[in-house]
Image: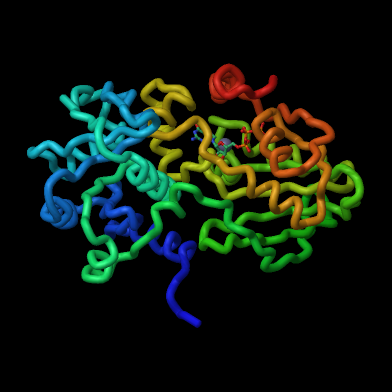
Amino acid sequence: MTFAPDTTERLARARADLRTGVPVVMSSGLVILAVETLTKDRFDSLRSIGPDPVLAITGWRAHTLKAHAYDGDIARIALPSFATVTWARSIADPADDLNHPMKGPLKTLRDGPAGPVHAAISLAKSAQLLPSVLCAPVLDPKSFAAANDLTLVSTDAISDPEASPLTRVVHAGLPMDASEAGRVHIFRPDDGGEEHYAIEIGHPDRGKPVLARLHSACFTGDVLGSLKCDCGPQLRGAMAQMGSEGAGVLLYLNQEGRGIGLANKMRAYSLQDQGFDTVEANHRLGFADDERDFRIGGEILQKMGFSQVRLLTNNPAKIAKLESCGLDVTERVPLRVGENRHNQAYLATKASKSGHLL
Ligand SMILES: Nc1nc2c(ncn2[C@@H]2O[C@H](COP(=O)(O)OP(=O)(O)OP(=O)(O)O)[C@@H](O)[C@H]2O)c(=O)[nH]1
Ligand SMILES: [Zn+2]
């Protein structure tokens, strides 16, 4: 019997720590701080630990900064003696890139293990922060964490995260425009992450393919009626189709901004104001085109008793991911609604760069 948090619970704490600017200690012997929430005091403390702290960024961000990424999809930059919090932020955050394109010379490291640094960046991403961390080595991570009252996390657990199991916490009826026979189910992950919702329409037969949609949260499109994307019309179009067929299930997955979070999506929008397209903006921020984990959708559908789906989507990646979770996608049902003059280029980019079907 113990009250001590387990590996998953420690990860949840670590994400909260990074978001509040508190360092996290990794079992492989690194103390890390997220650049986005870095303060001068903590920066100075980290430097006082010893020599050789590094600033880690992703390969995408390194590419934008014309820095060598010897570690593949991440790069470790040796911290120059003149480095300040503002300097570190300018490396992590592309907001000012066009005004100050020359940040270097940046010396990236080739030697030494990159795996733990890779894990540290994954942790920052899962905290929905800019994917950049300051790392300093410590010889005895356990003692360092205990002495400073910091969270100690397993590097292996971050490097190889399993999808957290989801529990259905409640469901209740909800009459809606699309159908009066609506029901909302709330699913909560065990790891303290975002909850996801399933909107069930009618009484879909569990023995037959269900009309289904995996919708990723889009605050700007779903709530504000943004014309920059097609999410709002897709959400309402999918619900209307389920309503008119009398049955269906829409998963509302809280993976805002293709999994990078609303703050980062708005950073991407600000870059789009500067002329970059939706994919380029993600890359300049250091993210891949799409950071979503569709295993969540697969698990919810299976927990609800569905094994066969007719999937409303234009995105072949969603079909592939559901099938890899063991679901049978018997049909792709196209969902082309909501095109307007503001989102034409966005939709064209999704087709040309992300493989969306027209
Ligand atoms: N990072 C980023 N996310 C965006 C942008 N525009 C929209 N999104 C997000 O993209 C996601 C769109 O989700 P979906 O419509 O479910 O997915 P999709 O990949 O377009 O696939 P289908 O609509 O099923 O064809 C939402 O999470 C939006 O918040 C953008 O410019 N940048
Ligand atoms: Zn949208």
Instruction: Describe residue 13's horizontal placement relative to residue 172 as left or right.
Output: left
Residue 296, how many percent across, how many down? 64, 49
Residue found at x 19% / y 23%: 102
Residue found at x 73% / y 38%: 323
Residue 186 can be seen, yes or no: yes
- Determine which quarter of the picture holds residue 146: bottom left
Residue 101, how many percent across, how many down? 22, 23
Residue 315 can be seen, yes or no: no
Instruction: Describe residue 258's horizontal placement relative to residue 123 as left or right.
Output: right
Residue 56, how many percent across, how many down? 29, 39
Tally of numbered discs = 0
Residue 255, how many percent across, how many down? 55, 46
The extreme left residue here reads: 81
- Work out whether residue 72 or residue 192 is closer to the camera in this orientation and state it: 72
What colour scheme was applied to this rendering of the protein? rainbow
Residue found at x 58% / y 18%: 348
The extreme bottom residue here reads: 1
- Work out whether residue 250 or residue 56 is closer to the camera in this orientation and state it: 56
The image quadrant where one finds ligand 2 is top right
Instruction: Describe residue 102's horizontal placement relative to residue 223 as left or right.
Output: left
Classify the position of the C terminus by image quarter.
top right
Residue found at x 31% / y 27%: 70
Instruction: Describe residue 122's horizontal placement relative to residue 84 as left or right.
Output: right
- Work out whether residue 205 or residue 184 is closer to the camera in this orientation and state it: 205
| Location of residue 97 with respect to 42 vertically, above or below | above
| Location of residue 296 with respect to 147 vertically, above or below | above
| Location of residue 335 with respect to 202 vertically, above or below | above
